[in-house]
Image (cartoon, rainbow, N blue to C red):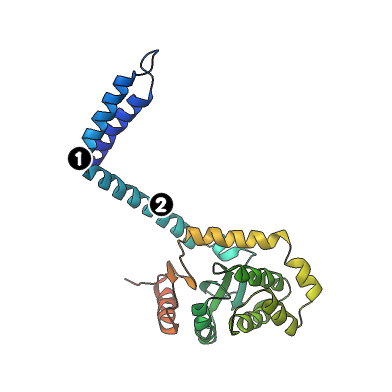
C-alpha cells in the first residue's frame, strides 16, 4: 500500500506540475513535451502501477458499495422496510422480514411464487415486503404502475391475492393483464385509472431503482433476508434455512 501511495504521489506531483502555470508564464511547448516524456517513461518502466491503481480503486468502490448496502439493510427505518411504495403481506407485525424485489414478467419470480406462499404459511411470524422492480420491459413498468394503484385499494391478503393472480399468470404481463386482474377482484377501476397516473407512482419506481443500485441487484427475483442480499430463485429450502438462522442468531450465518 505504501508503494502504491508513493508511486501515485509521484505521478500526481508530475501531473500537477504539468497543469499549473510556472510563475507568471505557462510551461513552454518543449517543457510540456519533456514532462510528458518523463511521465510516459515512468509508466512504461512501472506498468504494474496502473494495475495496482485499478485494483485499489476497485477495492475502494467495493468497500463503499458494501457500506451503503449494510447501512440500508441494518437500519430498520430505511425505505427498504418503511416505504409507502411497497406492499406488506403475511404478518405485518412479524419479527422475521423477507423483502422481495420482483418483476411481473420474470419467469424465475413466477417459479418462486409457490415457495413464498409456502413460507408465509409455514412461518406465521414472517412479514413479506413486496417491492416492484420492473427491469425487464416497458410492459413490466406498466404492470407495476397498475399494481401501485391497486395498493391504494387492496391491503394485506387482498393485495396478496392480486399479486398471486398477476404474477402466476401465463404469458406476457402488462397494463391490460394487470387491469383485468384488478377488475376481476372488484377494484374501483375509475380510481385505478386515476391513481396509476399519480406522481407517487413514478416516485415509487424511482425509489425501487435507487434501492436496487444501492443493494447492487443485478436481476430478479432478489431478496433481503437478515443481513444478506440474495439474488436468484434459490428455492424454499434455502430461504427457510436463512430465516431459521435469522430467528436463531439474528444473522443469515450463525457463528
Kindly identify which numbered label has been placed on residue 46.
1
Left or right for 112, reference 163? left
The residue mark sitting in front, 2 or 1, is 1
Kindly identify which numbered label has been placed on residue 64.
2
Camera-side residue: 229 or 23?
23
Give coordinates of residue 106: x percent, y percent: 53, 76
Q: Quadrant where the C terminus lies?
A: bottom left
Left or right for 36, reference 246? left
Give coordinates of residue 169: x percent, y percent: 60, 84
Camera-side residue: 201 or 100?
201
The residue shown at (41%, 76%) is 242
Kindly identify which numbered label has been placed on residue 224.
none
Work out whether mark 2 precedes mark 1 in sequence or the reverse, and give the earlier one. Answer: 1
The residue shown at (76%, 72%) is 192
Give coordinates of residue 22: x percent, y percent: 35, 17
Q: Quadrant of residue 12?
A: top left
Q: Quadrant where the N terminus lies?
A: top left
Residue 78 seen: no
Amino acid at each position: 500500500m505504501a508503494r502504491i501511495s508513493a508511486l501515485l504521489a509521484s505521478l500526481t506531483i508530475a501531473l500537477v506540475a504539468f497543469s499549473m502555470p510556472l510563475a507568471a508564464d505557462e510551461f513552454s511547448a518543449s517543457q510540456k513535451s519533456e514532462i510528458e516524456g518523463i511521465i510516459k517513461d515512468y509508466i512504461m518502466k512501472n506498468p504494474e502501477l496502473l494495475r495496482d491503481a485499478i485494483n485499489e480503486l476497485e477495492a475502494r468502490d467495493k468497500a463503499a458499495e458494501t457500506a451503503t448496502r449494510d447501512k440500508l439493510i441494518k437500519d430498520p427505518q430505511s425505505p427498504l422496510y418503511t416505504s409507502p411504495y411497497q406492499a406488506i403481506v403475511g404478518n405485518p407485525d412479524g419479527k422475521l422480514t423477507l423483502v422481495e424485489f420482483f418483476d411481473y414478467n420474470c419467469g424465475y419470480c413466477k417459479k418462486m411464487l409457490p415457495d413464498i406462499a409456502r413460507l408465509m404459511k409455514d412461518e406465521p411470524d414472517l412479514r413479506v415486503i413486496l417491492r416492484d422492480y420492473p427491469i425487464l420491459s416497458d410492459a413490466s413498468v406498466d404492470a407495476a404502475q397498475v399494481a401501485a394503484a391497486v395498493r391504494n385499494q387492496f391491503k394485506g391478503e387482498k393485495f396478496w391475492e392480486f399479486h398471486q393472480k398477476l404474477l402466476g399468470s401465463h404469458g406476457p404481463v402488462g397494463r391490460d393483464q394487470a387491469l383485468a386482474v384488478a377488475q376481476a377482484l372488484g377494484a374501483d377501476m375509475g380510481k385505478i385509472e386515476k391513481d396509476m397516473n399519480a406522481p407517487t407512482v413514478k416516485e415509487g419506481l424511482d425509489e425501487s431503482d435507487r434501492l436496487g443500485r444501492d443493494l447492487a441487484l443485478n436481476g430478479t427475483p432478489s431478496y433481503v433476508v437478515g443481513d444478506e442480499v440474495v439474488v436468484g430463485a434459490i428455492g424454499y429450502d434455502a430461504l427457510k434455512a436463512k430465516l431459521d438462522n435469522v430467528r436463531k442468531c439474528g444473522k443469515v450465518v450463525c457463528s
